[in-house]
Image: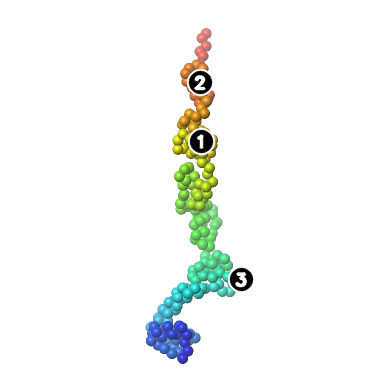
Amino acid sequence: MSYGDGGYMMSIMTGVTGETWDDDASVASENVEAPLRRAWNRYRRIEGVERVKRGYVTRTRGIAGCQYKTGKMDNMKNHKAAKHGINVVWFSCDQDNCDYKAKQTSNLRHHRQHVHNIDVKWYHCDSCEYKAKRAGGLKEHNIDVVWHHCDLCDYKAKQGSVLKVHKLNVHKVGVVWHQCEFCDHKAKQSSDLKHTKPTRKIIK
């Protein structure tokens, strides 16, 4: 009597022993009763899960030079489609005048977000109007910023010129006043004094 691990497990599950469950036997033949076939299929499913747990993996077959391996058939299917062009299912962009297509839905989703701004989750800067489509982009933005802080309030700006304008308009720092020569009016810009000049009337 010679039957392997599979035969031993089937003998425990069904109570049938002997050559019936020899690994080389065809247990899926028409001579095997339905309950025994169901028991065999159940065993194969359990054995498949256990093989994955024990580290057994499925390798690519018939592809020279490919060392990729995985324990999930879906991963293998995606690998063959993406890397070897086997059984590729293309996902096309549905936007007008766009011919883009991808082998994976994740790539199509990335394309729609970054090219067409569809279903974009914006990441907004707390200190300015900048926004990014990626959290990494916002992080890089904040790292690269050199803030210029106002020494009179909590205001800050990315550019020194903007801070200068703030201090000029809000705190009146560095203001050069232009005084009207005809009245007491004064302005920060000489152009604002034009309306104060009197108009002369010519009397005949």
Q: Residue 13's x, y, as percent?
A: 39, 83
- The Cα–Cα distance between marks 2 and 1, rounded to whole angstroms, is 25 Å
Residue in the picture at 50% in, 74% down: 56
Q: Tell me, yes or no, whether the two marked residues, 3 and 2, touch with CB atoms within 8 Å.
A: no
Q: Which residue is mark 3?
A: 65
Residue that numbered label 2 is attached to: 179
Which element type, helix, strand or loop, lies under badge 2? Answer: strand
Image x and y of residue 35, in percent: 38, 83
Q: Residues within 10 Å of mark 3 (few under 14, many from 20)?
A: few
Q: Residue furthest bottom?
A: 1
Circle 1: element type: helix
Do the residues under discs 2 and 1 have CB atoms within 8 angstroms? no
Distance (Cα) linking label 3 and label 1: 61 Å
- Sequence order check: which comes first, mark 2 or mark 1? 1
Observer-side mark, 2 or 1, equals 1
Q: Which mark is residue 176?
A: none
- Residue drawn at (52%, 36%), measured in percent from left and top? 162
